[in-house]
Amino acid sequence: MSQRVSGLVLAPLDSRALVRPVEEAWRSGIPTVVFDSALEAPHPAISFVATDNEEGGRLAARRMGELLGGRGTVLMLRYQEGSAATEDRERGFLTELKAAHPAVKVISSDQYAGATRDTAKRASENLLNRFADSIDGIFTPNESSTAGMLLALQDIGRAGKVGFVGFDYSALFLEPLRKGELGGFVVQNPVNMGYLSVKTMVDHLQKRPVPKVVDTGVMMVTLANLNDASVQAVINPPEAR
C-alpha cells in the first residue's frame, strides 16, 4: 500500500487474519484478487481464483471408496486451522464419503498436521501409534501432510498396506505411487492459477468485467492415468521443464 501499487494478487495463509489488510487496501484505492485459499466474507476482493477444493475432497473420497471396495475404516489428518482451502477439501471428503460409501467408517478426523512436513510426520506418528492396526485407509489434504504421513507409514512398514489418498503434487510422490504406497493424489493446476490470477487483475485494471469466482481445475492422479497428456500438462508443465 505504501508503494501505491495498482493492485494486489494475494494467496492468504489465514482466512480471517488477512481480511482487514484487503479492506484497508480497498479503502486506499488498491483492488485485490485473492487466489488459492479464500478469505472469510465479507471482504472487498474483486475475484477469487482457485481450485474447487470441495470437489477435490470429493474426488479423494471417491478414490478411497474404490481402493477399499466400499467398506473399511479410514482416518483423515487435517492440515491446520484457518486454512480455508484445506478445510473445504476436508469437508468435501467427509461429506462425499458418507454419502457415497456409508460402509466406510471414519475413526479419526480431528487431528491437525501443522504447517510443515516435520510437524505432519509427528502428528502422523501419533495417529499411527493409536490406529495403525485398525485402519484400511488414510486421507491427507495437502502436500506437507501427505509427505509427513508417507514418511511415517514407511518408517513402520505400513506403506502400501493401507489405501492412501493425498492432495497436491510433489515429485517425491511419483515413486510411492508406482510402488502402491500411494493410491492416488488430487492435483490442482498451480501454473494456470497463477496465470489467471494476474490476468484477472489486469482485466480489472483495464476496466473489463471479471467473474467473482474463477475455477482453475482439479483432477485425481493414479498409476493408471499418470502418463496421460492431461495429467503430465499439470504435474510437468512446459514452463517448468
Image (tube, rainbow, N blue to C red):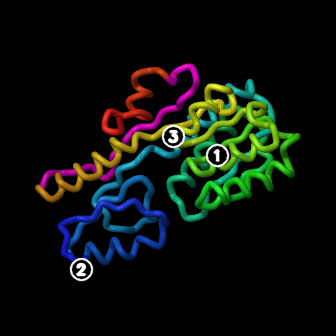
Quadrant in the picture for residue 229: top left
Sequence-first disc among 3 and 2: 2
| Distance Cα–Cα, label 3 vs label 2 | 36 Å
Task: Report the disc number at residue 59.
Answer: none
Sequence-first disc among 1 and 3: 1
Of circles 1 and 3, the one toward us is: 3
Q: Residue furthest front?
A: 241
Viewer-side residue, 203 vs 210: 203
Quadrant in the picture for residue 189: top left
Instruction: Kindly identify the amino acid type of the residue bearing the numbered disc 3.
Output: Tyr
- Tag 2 residue: 2
Viewer-side residue, 82 vs 124: 124
Quadrant in the picture for residue 74: top right
The span shown in magenta is 207-226
In the rendered image, residue 236, in percent from the top left (x then y), is placed at 41, 33
Q: Quadrant of the N terminus?
A: bottom left
Q: Is residue 66 above or below residue 173?
A: above
Task: Report the disc number at residue 140.
Answer: 1
**Left or right of 148 in this view: 45:** left
Crowding at dot 1, Cα within 10 Å, few <14 / some 14-19 / many 20+, comes out as many
Crowding at dot 3, Cα within 10 Å, few <14 / some 14-19 / many 20+, comes out as many
Instruction: Kindly identify the amino acid type of the residue bearing the numbered disc 1.
Output: Thr
Instruction: Kindly identify the amino acid type of the residue bearing the numbered disc 2.
Output: Ser
- Point 15% across, 59% down: residue: 205
- Asked if marks 1 and 2 touch (Cβ < 8 Å), the reply is no
What is the secondary structure assignment of the residue under circle 3? Answer: loop
